[in-house]
Amino acid sequence: MNRRMMYLLLSSILITGWLIWPGDQSLPVLKTTQPFEMKSVLQEGHYSSHNGKIKIVAFFYTACPDICPFTMSDLSDVQTAVKENPRLKEKVELVSITLDPEEDTAERITQYAEAFQADPWIWHWLKGTAEETDAVTKDYQMQSVKLDDQTIAHSTTLYMVDQQHQIRGMYPMATQSASVNKKQLLEDIQSLLDGS
């Protein structure tokens, strides 16, 4: 199975689950995750997810040819919206975790983050050990398979996580033909802040 077919298969499984959520105004609790700590590349220290903030969590790897950079470009727009709203800036952050800690050096991740104008106080770029990465991907049910040194087939989902570490939203990552639904993502963040 080639990489494109793997992406499509994994995406269809996750999007199907996303589409059958209840259509009411409240956001469902999809899963409770465990707090985690990882090395923060841009802040040169350790990041703890146990910080009382709403998080938009994305998994990536720097050699990804399409879905990851398209998604990070859209998340750059989300970062701008967060920065421009004082309430969001105080309570919301973006978290990007590499799926390839062996190949993605701190220098490589820094260059990648800078390409998307990442603000290190709002957008955290994390690199764990292989064991830490495996634990978080399993907890988030993020499927990934390393095919070679340059290619990782992975599921294509963004996660919105509330202050209690509960996944409250899952959104398809971007493709060449479809952007992240930034409007829905920001509306859902606002809904969480409003206590819906």
Image: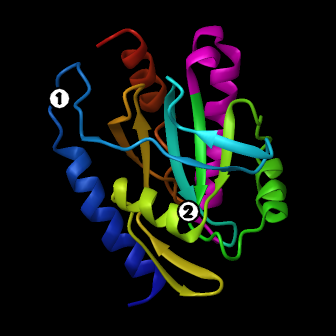
Q: Can you say whether 80 is above or below 102 in the image?
A: above
Would you say residue 53 is visible in this rendering?
yes
Give the numbered dot on residue 5. Answer: none
Would you say residue 156 is visible in this rendering?
no
Give the numbered dot on residue 23. Answer: 1
Going from N to C along the chain, the mark reached first, 2 or 1, is 1
Q: Can you say whether 33 is above or below 84 in the image?
A: below
Residue 185 shown left or right of residue 29 in the figure: right
Q: Can you say whether 147 is above or below 163 in the image?
A: below
Q: Quadrant of residue 139?
A: bottom left
* Total tally of numbered discs in the picture: 2
Amino acid on which the number 1 mark rests in the picture:
Gly
Q: Which residues are magenta?
A: 64-92
Does the CB distance between marks 2 and 1 fall below 8 Å? no
SS at mark 1 in the image: loop
Give the numbered dot on residue 67. Answer: 2
Amino acid on which the number 2 mark rests in the picture:
Ile
Q: Overall secondary structure of the magenta stretch?
A: helix
SS at mark 2 in the image: helix
Q: Residues within 10 Å of mark 2 (few under 14, many from 20)?
A: some
